[in-house]
Image (spheres, helix red, strand yellow):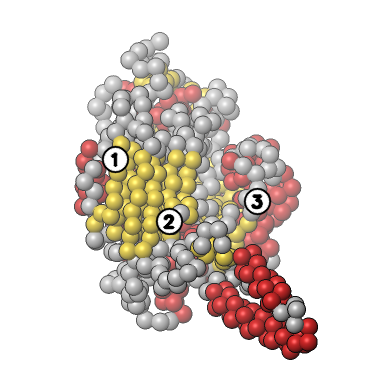
Amino acid sequence: MKILRTSKATLFSLQAFSDYVGKFHRHRRKLWPFLGLWKLAVVVILVYFLGSSLLISSALVGPNETQSNSKGVLESDEPSVGRLVSQLKLQELTDTTLNIRVISSKDLVSVSVDNTVIYEIKGYQSYEPKSEANTGGRGIHVLVLHQVTGALMSSRVFDTYSPREDEAMALFVNMVQDNRIFVFAIKDEGTFHLKPPSRRLLLSMGSTEMSRVGWRDMWAMVAVKGAGKIAEGYAKSPDFESWAKRLEVSAEVKLLAEPAPPCWPSSPTEDRRIDFCDRIEGYGSICSCDNPAPIAFNPPPPINNQIANVPVAIIASNRPHYLCRMLQSLLSAHGANPDNIVVFIDGFFEETLSVAKLFGLRGIQHAPVGSKTGRISQHYKISLSAIFSMFPLATHAIVLEEDLDVSPDFFSYFGQTLGLLAADPSLYCVSAWNDLGYEYTSMDPTLLYRVETMPGLGWMLSRDLFYTELEPQWPPPDKTWDWDMWMRLGEIRQGRECIIPDVSRTFHFGASGVNMNSYFHDKYFSKRSFNTIPDVDMIGVEAMVQEQYEGLLEYELSRGRVLLECPCNEINGTSHIYIKEKEIPHIFFIQMKHSKDFNSWLALAKCLHIWDLDARGYHHGLWRLFINETPFYIIGAPFSPYSAYMPPEVTPLKLRIKKTKKSKSSAAKLKNINKNP
């Protein structure tokens, strides 16, 4: 509602004029009726003209604006739209420029546009991995603004103190279209792992300071991609132990008059692309005019279509670029049905929801419940409950995280193993992930195993398991437990096992997250095996039923060759390479006194450069993997029932991790205690 305001000065002038007229003619009583009418007419005329002037002035004030008589300006809740600098002189409304202010400092990055803060990250990040002070935001912050509207299209943080983050930043910058407005700013430290190629990229965008930005220096730049730098600032740290002083950079960027017309023909599918690419940046070929990546897929059905009615719940949060990559691989897998796929988003993240809509999928947002790992746990519970409610006829569901690639035969794999969950009550789940599946320890995409641990990372469970067992016992929000560790507990798993492939059907590419960083990902996830063959026909699916699986192991172990030396060269101290014997299983016995005695296994796992943080992927004290393309059976004796296959003259090897004198860290050297008591 518009409100007209008349100043006190104007009201005073009207009253004074009326009093003057009254006094001037007070002695002419006989003429008063005539003079009174004349006075009234003059007042009415003055009020009419003054009121018209006020109406004209107020018409220039928008619905969210008010006049200020003390300052002589029109104030608005939207400071970048329709400003007038004076009541006395109307000026042409203009929004052709953006005034950008950037702050770079140890504990703050802030970006303001036309005196409005559009982005701000506060807090100091400790360099200790488990410190409570970790608030995030260390590294180089990158914002992308629309060159016509000035709207924020994307914001990313690259922790270039850590490895590989500079490569991710370069990839992001290269995926952004020309003419977009870039804002860069360092928070805390941003150069420890900023390699020359990434520096050269920033120099090519117009930077003149990047070549000398160093340890704990502050730096900020505003640039237009393809046009060059608008403004840049640099502050040097005084010494190694200190940070540079707070840096502020201001820039005025001229906006383009009109946006370029869409380069894709209008259609229901391409209209989704047009809307997405006009609002959001950093998705490369998705928004390419020359060769746009597909956003609609029509893959062939899987070789076993029992999976057609099984819904897929995608667990997502605020990592939309991860989600985009995952959906591209999922929707192109043979048998993918978009109608059965739902993206569940933990929080109200608009960009993540937009990615789901871009691919024509349903996205469901919910308010976060709990904090830290407790919040993640509740997100899984809410998503599982919702997926079974949305698909009331589904007897099973598949759960996927947003940072996983899936293989072309992903749905075929689950279709061929679906019947096992119904046929064998000793089974807990079917997983697409092998915890021990590395490029050098797995090789057969047709092979299946039974394991006591719950791998996750792309898995299938039954409706009955969730509603009758898991949901009633699910940890409450105040319990900061990892949901998957909870599902592995003996009292929850109750002795049941999961089916896994020798070669994984998912690949974990996410290098950032609550429990993930680039170093950890490089060490444990970057060299994982991953099936790329479509329509793999799994062999021996029926043999995964409990009794038949035991018979299969009995056959393999009875014909295997027992090794007397450890298969790990670092323990042997030799350069011995085992001859490839693909048809003959090799059996190796390690010490395992009871069900929790994993010392020898973890020492061997560390030597083999596979997962060694805890024991996973075992079946009754037996581990299966390939070494030099030869099948190996590692048996923990005397605990494992398969110790019966150990010859009397063989003693299980006791392996331990021995810390070296050079380092007091967790870096360790393996030692065969049998040979060096």
Residue 200 location, x and y as percent?
Answer: 21, 47
Pointer 2 residue: 113
Q: What is the distance, in whole Å, between disc 3 and disc 2 at their CAs?
A: 40 Å
Closer to us: 315 or 430: 315
Residue 29 against residue 441 in the figure, above or below: below
Please tell me which of labels 1 and 2 falls first in the chain. 2
Please name the residue shown 75% across and 78% down the image. 27
Please name the residue shown 26% across and 38% down the image. 213
- Label 3: state its secondary structure: helix
**Taking 470 as reference, is 253 left or right?**
left
Residue 304 location, x and y as percent?
Answer: 50, 66
Pointer 3 residue: 381
Please tell me which of labels 3 and 2 falls first in the chain. 2
* Few, some or many residues within 10 Å of mark 3 (<14, 14–19, 20+): some
Please name the residue shown 52% across and 58% down the image. 71
Picture quadrant of residue 281: bottom left
